[in-house]
Every structure is written in C-alpha cells, then in structure tokens.
Amino acid sequence: RRGRLLALLLDRLKNETTRIAAIKTLTVVAAASREGEGEGEALDLSPILAEAVLEMASLLRQQSRGIKQSALEALDIVVQCQGVKAMDAALFDSVLKELGGIIVDSDLHISHLSLRASMSILKVCPSSGPSVKAHVLPPALVLSTSPLLQDNLTLQSLLSLLEQLVISKAIPFEELLSSLRGRLSDEGNEKGGGGAGVHGGSKQAVSNLAKCIAAITAAAPTPDREALIADLLGTLESWDDASSPEEAQRIRLALLASGDLGKLVDLSVSEGVAQRLQVVYLSLFESNSDDVKHAAAYALGRSAAGSRAIFLPAILDGLEQNREKKQYLLLSALRELIHVHLHEGKGDISDSAPLILPHLFKHCGDREEGVRTMVAECLGSLTCLQPAEILPQLRDLVAQHSGKKSPQDDGEAADSNEDPETKKDALICWTIAIAVKFAIAGHADPMQLSPFMPAFLVLLKENDLSVKNTALLMVYSAVHHSPQLVAGLMQEHILPSLHELAQLNLKRVVDLGPFKHHVDDALPLRKAALSIFSTCLEKCPGCLDIPAFMPILAKALADVEDIQLQAHQIVISMCFRHPNPIVNAVEKFVEPLEKTINKKKGQKTGTELERVNEWIKSGLRVMISLSQVDGVMDCRKFADFLDRTRKNMKFHPMLKLIDEER
C-alpha cells in the first residue's frame, strides 16, 4: 500500500498540472520522516527517491520561477532528510549540474536556494566534492563579485558553501584562495579594461571577496590560517601611498579580509599578530586614499569584535587624543564594533559600554556633521543593546541642553555671531534626536523606549531649525517602525507642532551679486511634517485629527512643486481610505489644483518640460480621484472645474494616459 502511494506521488510529480502540489507533498513527507526518527518507523522514500530527485532537478530548467523555487526548496529538504538513502555521487552530479546553471545575480533568491541545496548535498555526500567544484563553484565565484550581493541571504549561503568546500576538503584551501583573489582582476577584464584598481573591482566586489576569503580562512586548518594571516600582514606592512591604483585595490582587499577574519577568530591568540595589525590599521589612517582609510577603519572595528581587549583600547585612546582628522575614522571603527554585536550577536558588550559612552557624549556637539552622525549611529545601536543604561543618559542630555534661547528664535535664520554655547546645545540636541531615530529603526525594545519618548519629543519645540527637522525625522521613524511608541502622544506632544511646522514659511533672499537667490529655510520641515501625516494615515489613522489637517493640506496643494506632489499623493490615498473629510474640504482644493494643471510651460524643453508635464499630470490624477468619491460632485465649484478640464482639448492626451494607467 505504501509503495502504491509513493508511485502515485511520483506520477503526480511528472504531471504538469499536479507537479507543484506533488513537490510540496514530497517536501512535507521528507521533513516528517526526519522529525519521526526515534519515535517509530521513519517513512522510507528510497523506492522513488532517485527518480523524484532527477525529476525535480529537471524542473530547474523551467521558465516558471514558482516551479524552480518549489523544486529547490524540496531538493534541499529531501537531500537533508533522505540524502544517504538510494542517492550516490553520480546522481548528485546530475543535480549539481542543474543547480550550477541557475546561480546568477539576476535572481538572487533562486541563487540562494541553489547554493543552499548544493551545500546540503556536499554535507551528506562529501564524495560529491568534485562535482560541486566543477558545476557550482565557477558560477559561485562569478556571483561573489556581483555588486548586487550586499549582506543578503545569498551572500550568507555563498559563504556557507565556501566554508563547506574547505571543511569537506573538496578543493585545496590554497586553490580556492587563489581563485577568489583572481576574481579581482577577472572582474576588471570582464568590464572591459585594464587593471582591477582602474576600471574593475567595484567597492562591493572587493567587500564580498574579503568576506569570502575570511570565511574560508576561518574554516581552514590552523597552519593554512596562520600562513594567510602572515601573508596579509606582509602585504599591509609593505604598502606605501606611492603604489599603483591596482596595488591600492589589493591593499583594500587585504584590509577588509583581515577585519572580517578578525571578527570570526580571535587574532590575539597568535603572538604579536593583533598588535601588528593595530599599528598597521592606525598608520593607514594617514593614507592619501579615502578608500584605504575607510577600509582600515572597517578592519579595526571588525577586528575589535573578535579581540576587544587589544583593539578597543586603541580606538578609545585615539578618541581621547582628539585629533580632528582621525575622529571620524575612529568613530567609524567603533560603529563597526557595535554593529557586529547588534546584528550578529557577537557576545556581550555591556562591560565595554561604560568605557565607550564618555567618548560618544564628548563628540555629540562636534562641528562636523559627519562626526555627529557617526556618534548618533553608535548611540542608537548601543541603545538597542543596552536600553536600560543608555536611555536615561540620553534623556538627561536633552533636559540639560534643550529649551535654550537661540538667534533663530521667532523664525530668524542663524546669525554668524551666534553664541557658541547655544550652538553647541543645538548640535547636541540634533545628535540625540538622530540617535533615537537610529534606535527606533534598529528595533530597540518599545516597552523600554516608550517612557522616554515625551522627553525626546520636546525637541520639536526647539528654536533651532535643524533640531526641529531631526525631531520630525525621529517621529517619522517611530510612526514607520513602531507606531505604538507615539500613538498615545500624538494629540498632546506631536500634532500641535506638526500642524505648525507643516505651514511654516521662512523665505529669505540671498544676494549673490549679479542675481538674487530665494531660499526657504522651512521647506525641509514642511516636507517632513507631510511625510509624517502620510505615514500616520497608513499606520495609525486613529491618532490623527484629520478634519483639522484639511486646511493645511489645501495650503500644501498650493506650495512649491515638491510639497505639492506630496500633497497629491496624500489626497489620492485619502480618497479611498478617508473619503468623508475629503468631501467636506474639496472646495478648498479646486483653486490650487486648477492653478497646477494650468501651469505655463514657457520655453522649457527636454527634462524640464517632462518634469512640468508630470507635475500637471499629477494634478489631473488628483482631480480624477476626487471625482470618484461619493458626494464630491455635489460641490458645484469642483463639478464646474472638472467639466472645464475635461472639455479642454490640451488635457485630452494626459487624461487618456491616466485612464490607461487605471
């Protein structure tokens, strides 16, 4: 009876109509057989296993992405659960040939599934190593230098497969290392020209290759690992800024590989290695190449994750010396260290947080925006890791530095003679707001963050425009990632400021000699306020006072182009989700919409003309959407506007295009 059922399943697998259902059934049955081991007789699929695996492998040639995805998922499970039964290296060779053919960067998810299935085959059948090397490794090496491979599942699967190749000794470590290093020059040749450092070797390709080299080195026997570390050190210590661009690219690869390896293994166990690398990293901060300097900072931070006792004191000592040119790089290294702990669970950083925080707080008021942003990233990530310790200190900083009078009070732009202390207070508040934004985006615990939000929201009332803007970005991050953080605070703490800033205009004229330039300092604030309102409509509409926002929305429809386009999207969204407020306010929308669609094109050509046409078309889309809301046509003013527009021949081509879009 069981044999008849298995034969029927195989028959359904070969049927074009039922193959998807059969693949899913086979996956469930194979997985259940593994789960049932030790609890009774496991279901043996060996009577149909070889034929079913070959049939699923043949499906990988299909154009249908859904079939390929289902077949790959099933192959992975079947190989893991039944791979030692009725399957041999010859069978796996046929499967691996099909798997290698679909490893391409044009479909990263399919490539991820194919790499994962290849790794499962290599695990259950180490003798299939030559087949993996022949069929899967070449496209995997090509994939390794794809700029699309950026810290995603496909990259993780690629690293796991390369590790398994080393562990199973399917390919000698030196040969695999040489193949990876060779991809740097191969990529330059494929792109049509010259050396890797000149035309080829994109930054992402070098980063991916470094991760691959680090992964196989960490999995290699100790002698091979020590030999590579010695080679990397020799390369780094012998380099100077006068070297060729190609050599600079190789140095960057060596730096990134040493850093990624330092994250995976403790370099301090090898005598003198960590100390020599630390000296090299810090000396390369003086390089003339920005790419080399940033790679050195990355390597320093990553190595600190694996050997914190050696590298972290060097980072903190450098920050203590307060050399302006190195602050950004040292903070970048510190960010890498914290990110490794946050995103990859690399141990506990709580014992180091008290050492790190004073340096971060010291640079909260730095004049360089890049330095402050880096400090904010570090503080935000630390907040995700240690919310109970960090949040009270951030709150205290806000209380200490907010609420100060500024020359920007009453809507005036900053004066060149602004009080340094006031300016520093504003910079610190700016940094804290960005830090909280990063913490929210990093999914800090909402339960611990919620009690502190009212203290952070006072930054919306600061006089400094840049602080107001960052506070709005903080609110936007909360609404987008964790609406529950601000839903209960909207009416009292957020909406009054939101309504005010959405209408704020601070226009001034800058005299540039032969001509004058008009600047609106409040434009970023209006954009951010409208973005918050738009996201609230989607995430937490119940916390808004929608009727009160309608006059503000009508003003936005008459604002500058960027604000108008935002307002257009909001109105179109509300036509479907909140039609009643739209019906009550539609009369106020007519005048700004009519002005938009009748905008004069003048002598504009090319992209400028195309931009004006898209602007006009956006206004027409709003008009069409409004006309489909029940009750809107009862407004005589809007009905007349719609009728005039439809009768105007110049709008007919655009209206026809809009109808086709729908």
Image (cartoon, grey):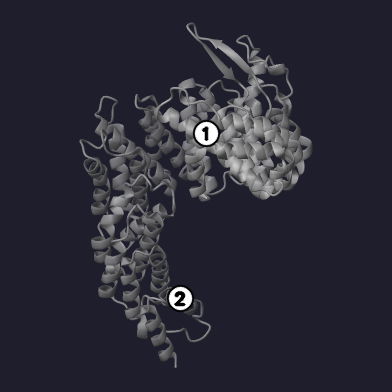
Instruction: Name the residue rendered at 36%, 77% in the picture.
Output: 84
Q: Of residues 27 and 267, which is closer to you in this image?
A: 27
Using the image, determine if residue 335 lies above or below residue 72: above
On the question of residue 440 being in view, the answer is no
Describe residue 35's horizontal placement relative to residue 76 as left or right: right
Identify the residue position indicated by label 2 in the image.
21
| Amino acid residing under circle 1 | Trp
Q: Of residues 620 and 560, which is closer to you in this image?
A: 620
Tag 2–tag 1 contact (CB < 8 Å): no
Q: Of residues 221 and 629, which is closer to you in this image?
A: 629
| Amino acid residing under circle 2 | Ala
Name the spot of residue 468 as percent of width and height, x first. Answer: 66, 27
Identify the residue position indicated by label 1 in the image.
615
Q: CA distance from mark 2 to mark 1?
A: 48 Å
On the question of residue 636 being in view, the answer is yes
Name the spot of residue 423 as percent of width and height, x first. Answer: 64, 18
Question: Looking at the figure, which quarter contains the N terminus?
Answer: bottom left
Using the image, determine if residue 361 lies above or below residue 20: above
Q: Earlier in the sequence, mark 2 or mark 1?
A: 2
Name the spot of residue 375 as percent of width and height, x first. Answer: 56, 31
Q: Secondary structure at mark 1?
A: helix
- Quadrant assignment, res 71: bottom left
Q: Residues within 10 Å of mark 2 (few under 14, many from 20)?
A: some
Where residue 632 is drawn, which disc sits there?
Answer: none
- Quadrant assignment, res 2: bottom left
Q: Nearer the viewer, mark 2 or mark 1?
A: 1
Q: Of residues 352 and 25, which is closer to you in this image?
A: 25
In the orientation shown, which residue stands out farthest toward the right?
492
Instruction: Name the residue rendered at 40%, 57% in the picture.
Output: 157
